[in-house]
C-alpha cells in the first residue's frame, strides 16, 4: 500500500493531553500505554513533550516521563520533543539525560527546544523571560560540552554520569531553529505538514547551511505533523475536532483546555473569530483512510526529502487514537516487533549509543 522507502522510520510524539472529566494522572498513564503500543507496531521513536501550567497537558517533566516510558518498553527509542532548554541549566539537563542513557543504553534521544512558558505568569514562575530564548545556541553548546568534556565554563566541574556518553541531540525548529541546528551541525525536527511552503523553505535553509559536527556528519531532517487515520475520511477529520477547538479556545480566551468530545464541540456557539480559528485548525492535516494517508505521507516525504516523520496526534477518544496509529502503521508498511513483552521487569538492551539511532 505504502510507497515509502522500505524501512523508512516513522515515530511518535505524545503530549500527554488531558481529557475533560479525567485526572492528569490518566493522561500520563495513557502516554505510557501508547508507547507500548507504538513499540509493538514498529514505530522507531517515542517522544514526550514539556509544557508548564497548561490545563490541557499533563506532561510537565519530560525526562521523568521518558524514564517511565523507557522502563515500560524494551526496543523503541525514547526521548523528548523536547526539553525547553531556556527553562533549565544545561548541566542539569546533561545529568538527567546521562542518568537516562545509563539506565537505558542505546535507546535515549535528546530533543531540545527554545520555547518558554505559555504565559507571562508561567514564565515568571519558572524564573525566566522571553529574552532568554535568544541564548538557545549558547545553551546547546554548553549542554553538549558537558557530554564531551569540552565546555570552557566552570573548569573542574563535571556532569556525572553524562560525560563521555553519546546521547543523540535534535533541535526542534521554531523560527530560528533551522539555522541554529544547521550551524551546530545537529539533526533537525521541523513542522508542520500543513504549511508545506514554509516547511520546505526551512528544510532547504537547514541543508544549505549545515556544518558537519561530531554529532552528525550530514543533515538529518525529521518532519513533524498531525496524521489521523480512520475507516472513512469524514471519521478521520472528526478525530481532529478536539485539538482544533482547544487551539481556537486558547487563542481567543488565553487558556489551553483539556480535550472535549467532538459531539459537544460541534454544538458549541462560536464567535466568528473562534469559528475561523477552529476551521483553520481542522484544515491541511494529513487525514483519511489508510490508502489516502499512505499516498499523502509518501508525497510529503518525496517533497521534503525527510529522513524521518514524527507524528503528533491528539483526540478525545483514546481508543480511536490507538486505532489511528495502528492504521498509520499499516499504511506506512511498518514491521511489527514480535516476541516482545515490554514492561519494567525486562532488562534494557546493552547496545552502545549511536549518533542518530
Image (cartoon, grey):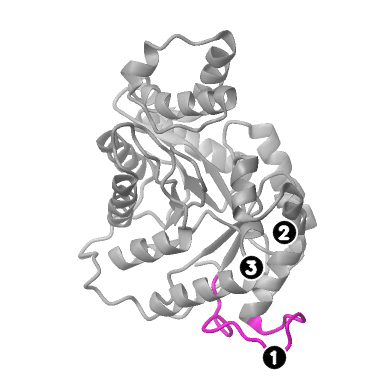
**CA–CA distance between discs 1 and 2?**
24 Å
Q: Is residue 76 above or below residue 294?
A: below
Q: Which residue is mark 3?
A: 89
Badge 2 vs badge 3, beta-carbon distance below 8 Å:
no
Badge 1 vs badge 2, beta-carbon distance below 8 Å:
no
Question: Which residue is painted at 65% across and 82% down in the image?
Answer: 148
Q: Which residue is mark 1?
A: 156
Question: Which residue is painted at 27% across and 52% down in the image?
Answer: 33
The reply to whether residue 305 is in sight is: no
**CA–CA distance between discs 2 and 3?**
11 Å
Q: Which residue is mark 2?
A: 136
The reply to whether residue 228 is in sight is: yes
User: Would residue 195 appear left or right of 248 to someone viewing this image?
Assistant: right
Magenta-tinted stretch = 148-167
Question: Which residue is painted at 44% across and 80% down in the image?
Answer: 102
Pinpoint residue 300: horizontal percent, then vertical percent.
Answer: 55, 38
User: In this rendering, which labeled residue sits more in front, label 1 or label 2?
Assistant: 1
Amino acid at each position: 500500500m505504502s510507497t515509502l522507502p522500505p524501512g523508512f522510520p516513522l515515530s511518535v510524539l505524545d503530549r500527554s493531553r488531558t481529557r475533560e472529566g479525567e485526572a492528569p494522572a490518566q493522561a500520563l498513564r495513557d502516554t505510557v500505554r501508547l508507547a507500548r503500543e507504538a513499540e509493538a507496531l514498529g514505530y522507531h521513536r517515542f517522544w514526550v513533550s514539556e509544557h508548564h501550567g497548561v490545563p490541557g497537558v499533563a506532561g510537565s517533566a519530560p525526562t521523568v516521563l521518558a524514564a517511565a516510558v523507557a522502563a515500560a518498553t524494551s526496543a523503541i527509542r525514547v526521548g523528548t520533543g523536547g526539553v525547553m532548554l531556556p527553562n533549565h541549566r544545561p548541566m542539569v539537563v546533561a545529568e538527567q539525560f546521562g542518568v537516562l542513557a545509563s539506565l537505558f543504553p542505546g535507546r535515549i534521544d535528546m530533543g531540545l527546544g527554545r520555547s518558554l512558558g505559555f504565559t507571562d505568569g508561567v514564565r515568571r514562575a519558572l524564573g525566566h523571560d522571553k529574552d532568554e530564548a535568544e541564548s538557545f545556541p549558547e545553551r546547546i553548546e554548553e549542554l553538549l560540552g558537558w557530554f564531551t568534556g569540552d565546555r570552557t565554563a566552570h573548569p573542574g566541574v563535571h556532569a556525572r554520569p553524562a560525560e563521555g556518553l553519546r546521547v543523540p541531540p535534535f533541535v526542534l525548529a521554531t523560527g530560528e531553529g533551522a539555522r541554529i541546528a544547521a550551524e551546530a551541525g545537529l539533526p533537525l525536527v521541523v513542522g508542520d505538514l500543513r504549511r508545506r511552503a514554509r516547511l520546505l523553505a526551512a528544510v532547504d535553509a537547514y541543508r544549505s547551511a549545515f556544518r558537519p559536527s561530531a554529532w552528525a556528519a550530514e543533515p538529518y531532517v525529521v518532519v513533524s505533523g498531525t496524521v489521523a487515520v480512520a475507516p472513512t475520511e469524514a471519521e478521520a477529520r472528526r478525530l481532529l475536532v478536539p485539538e482544533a477547538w482547544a487551539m481556537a479556545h486558547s487563542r481567543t480566551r488565553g487558556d489551553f483546555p483539556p480535550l472535549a468530545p467532538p459531539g459537544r464541540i460541534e454544538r458549541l456557539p462560536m464567535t466568528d473569530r473562534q469559528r475561523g480559528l477552529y476551521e483553520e485548525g481542522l484544515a491541511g492535516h494529513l487525514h483519511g483512510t489508510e490508502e489516502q494517508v499512505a499516498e499523502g505521507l509518501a508525497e510529503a516525504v518525496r517533497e521534503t526529502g525527510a529522513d524521518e516523520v514524527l507524528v503528533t496526534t491528539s483526540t478525545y477518544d483514546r481508543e480511536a487514537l490507538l486505532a489511528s496509529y495502528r492504521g498509520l502503521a499499516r499504511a506506512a508498511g511498518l514491521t511489527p516487533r514480535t516476541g516482545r513483552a515490554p514492561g519494567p521487569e525486562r532488562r534494557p538492551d546493552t547496545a552502545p549509543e549511536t549518533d542518530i539511532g
